[in-house]
Amino acid sequence: MLIKKSVNDLAILGGRSSFEEQLHVGRPNIGDKEALLRRIGEVVDRRWLTNSGPCLEEFERCLRQLLGVSHCDAMCNATVGLQLAMRAMGMSGEVIVPSFTFIATAHAIQWLGFTPVFCDVDPRTHNIDPARVEELITPRTTGILGVHVWGQPCDIEALETIARRHGLKLLFDAAHAFCCSWRGRMIGNFGGAEVFSFHATKVFNTFEGGALSTNDSELAWRVQRTRNFGFAGLDQTDTLGTNAKMSEASAAMGLTNLESLEDFVEVNRRNYLAYMRGLKGIPGIHMLEYDATEKRNYQYIVLEVEESEAVLSRDALQSILWAENVLARRYFYPGCHRMEPYASTMLGVGSRLPVTERLARRVLVLPTGTGVSEEQVEMICGILRFAVSHAGETAQRLRGTDTAQVSAALSQSRP
């Protein structure tokens, strides 16, 4: 293990990087390679590559059983799943959504010609704040799109109450929350529908993909129609549709990774506990804790950096880590409302999003998953502890270093 003895040993100041290979946030988890190749071989031999083949049907059956839902339809990705859900639920006009989320959530709304109305979040959970939701409802509001950030469920009960009181549709972006629960019931069972992401970077992946779950049979029927061009039979359409189908190869990956899902989650939990131990007591480093009484996938290691305590800013710590080949990420920087096309059309909206603005300056997400060992977690914690314990000298030395330029240069080497 490479030990830092002086600030000169920090890679950003000319020392040797702690890791030869880059450690990524969201490096793909891969299950049994032989089982995957066997399944894909069978797909090729059948020459049934898409259009609801045997792998997809089995995969959707497994998802329904795991989630305890009546319907679960796999998609090519979660963004399209959100769009199909909003259309099937009859949303239009304004849809209230947090700005502290991945940009795809907002884009899904805008792409349909609806208006995302950005809402602030709870400072403790980072999820949409129900009290702020109620303040944003207008005659044009038709729906609420909550996001289970970090796999921590929204305040589902409060949002359901608001939606009923105002006659609004309630949809959840559950991209982070696969294999998580709320009050003992699996995420996937709430609102009109919930949409999961099975992107390569998620705890569970199908190469690329997603799924929409619901207990509403009529809604499921509409989604199934629209994900396949609107076809109602062999050669007739009865509604506007698109191509949102999942391929057989992706479904084969999903079936294979389902067999290893518990192992993936256990590795994440092991790393989470190791980070908890390793970061304990570091001034200004506050780690998000998961509710151990519920099912969690422990997919994200989330820090909030309080610069007044750590002396070093979040961005300085990120640059220090990147130089060590630890590619920590600023989620969800800078907030959807500060990205295009919203930044140009929603001027001043940040004034009603103080928590979002604060989190965008503070949050740092660290690598975990099956590509990161417990020993590597300990080394990452050691780097952070060293940097903060030598914060005064490190900050002084960094004043002559363009940390943003360092991060930009390092990012060019990302795969």
Image: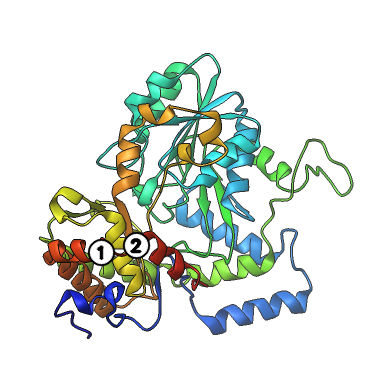
| Residue 382 picture location, percent across and down | 19, 73
Q: Picture quarter containing residue 108?
A: top right
Q: On the image, which quarter does residue 264 sit in?
A: bottom left
Q: Residue furthest top?
A: 139
Give the x, y percent position of residue 112. 65, 35
SS class, disc 2: helix
Please state, as top left, top right, bottom left or bottom right, where the N terminus lies in the image. bottom left
Q: From the viewer's perspective, is 274 left or right of 135?
A: left
Q: Are marks 1 and 2 in contact (CB under 8 Å)?
A: yes
Identify which amino acid the numbered label 2 is placed on: Thr
Q: Can you give x and y, in whole percent of width and height, for residue 171 in the image?
A: 50, 36
Does residue 117 lie above or below 378 as drawn? Answer: above
Q: Is the residue 334 above or below the residue 207 in the image?
A: above
- The answer to which of 27 and 339 lies nearer the viewer is 339
User: Could you tell me residue 161's position as x and y percent?
Assistant: 38, 24
When asked about the image quadrant of residue 329, the answer is: bottom left
- Image-based side of 286 in relation to 241, left or right: left
Q: Residue at x 87, y 49 (%)?
A: 234
- Disc nearer the start of the sequence (1/2): 1
